[in-house]
Image (tube, rainbow, N blue to C red):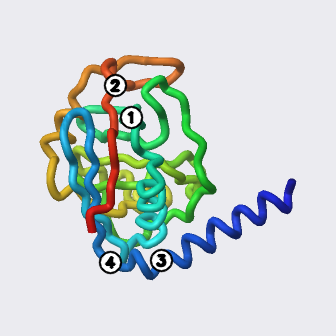
Amino acid sequence: MFLKKTALAVLTMSTLLVGLNAFAEQITVKMTTNKGPITLTLDGDKAPLSVSNFVEYAQAGYYDGTIFHRVIPGFMIQGGGFTSDMQQKETRSPIKNEADNGLLNTRGTIAMARTSDKDSATSQFFINVVDNKFLDNGARDFGYAVFGEVTEGMDVVDSIANVETANQGGHQNVPTQAVIIEKVEVVK
């Protein structure tokens, strides 16, 4: 069992590392939600692991049908890990945190969500709806890795940030009407 897990981790990291050169640039992604489209520009130069990770999940169709499951006005909207019935999706292995890349958690940026373990990010991400300096590297801890920004559709992000939320199944700040990520596609 240990060998299987080790082999899987090595294979995943090898895939990510081989893909780094392909993402050492600006990548445009269109995220279609039931509230409207959001266009993102991902920074493969400054956050190659995070961009590669996000793009691989997107190209596999992983995000299609997931929801923004955590929405906090005046803070951020988080998605990429749960289905509309609040079932958590299985993920690949976590990636290394790139929060020390110089990108900051300012309004409109997209960053990798994680647990208290700094290197625990998998599929979940969040979009900052305000400047969140306390999430930057060194502010409190290692920080949260920004890997891109919203270039179109910030009005959609703001709309999502203001939906009604409630507690659901042990989770807080869950939209009462599902905010569905219908499709995430790499445009260029």
Q: Earlier in the sequence, mark 1 or mark 3?
A: 3
Instruction: Please state which amino acid type lies under the numbered disc 4.
Output: Glu
The disc placed on residue 67 is 1
Element on which disc 2 rests: loop
User: Which residue is drawn at the image coordinates 25% and 33% (left, top)?
Assistant: 34
Quadrant of res 27: bottom left
CA distance separating discs 4 and 3: 10 Å
Instruction: Please state which amino acid type lies under the numbered disc 2.
Output: Ala
In the rendered image, residue 127, in percent from the top left (x then y), is placed at: 30, 48
Relative depth, front residue between 161 and 130: 161
Q: Earlier in the sequence, mark 2 or mark 4?
A: 4
According to the image, label 3 marks what residue? 20
CA distance separating discs 1 and 3: 27 Å
Q: Earlier in the sequence, mark 1 or mark 4?
A: 4
Q: Earlier in the sequence, mark 3 or mark 2?
A: 3
In the rendered image, residue 157, in percent from the top left (x then y), is placed at: 21, 41
Q: Earlier in the sequence, mark 4 or mark 3?
A: 3
In the rendered image, residue 29, in percent from the top left (x then y), is placed at: 28, 59
Vertical arrangement, residue 50 with respect to residue 132, above or below: below
In the rendered image, residue 70, in percent from the top left (x then y), is placed at: 39, 33
In this orientation, does residue 149 appear? yes
According to the image, label 4 marks what residue? 25
CA distance separating discs 1 and 2: 7 Å
Q: Kindly check if marks 2 and 4 are in contact, taking CB atoms under 8 A apart as contact.
A: no
User: Which residue is drawn at the image coordinates 21% and 48% (left, top)?
Assistant: 38
Q: Kindly check if marks 1 and 2 are in contact, taking CB atoms under 8 A apart as contact.
A: yes
The disc placed on residue 178 is 2
Vertical arrangement, residue 67 with respect to residue 7, above or below: above
Instruction: Please state which amino acid type lies under the numbered disc 1.
Output: Ile
Quarter the C terminus occupies: bottom left
- Does residue 82 appear to the left or right of 43 in the view shown? right
Element on which disc 3 rests: loop
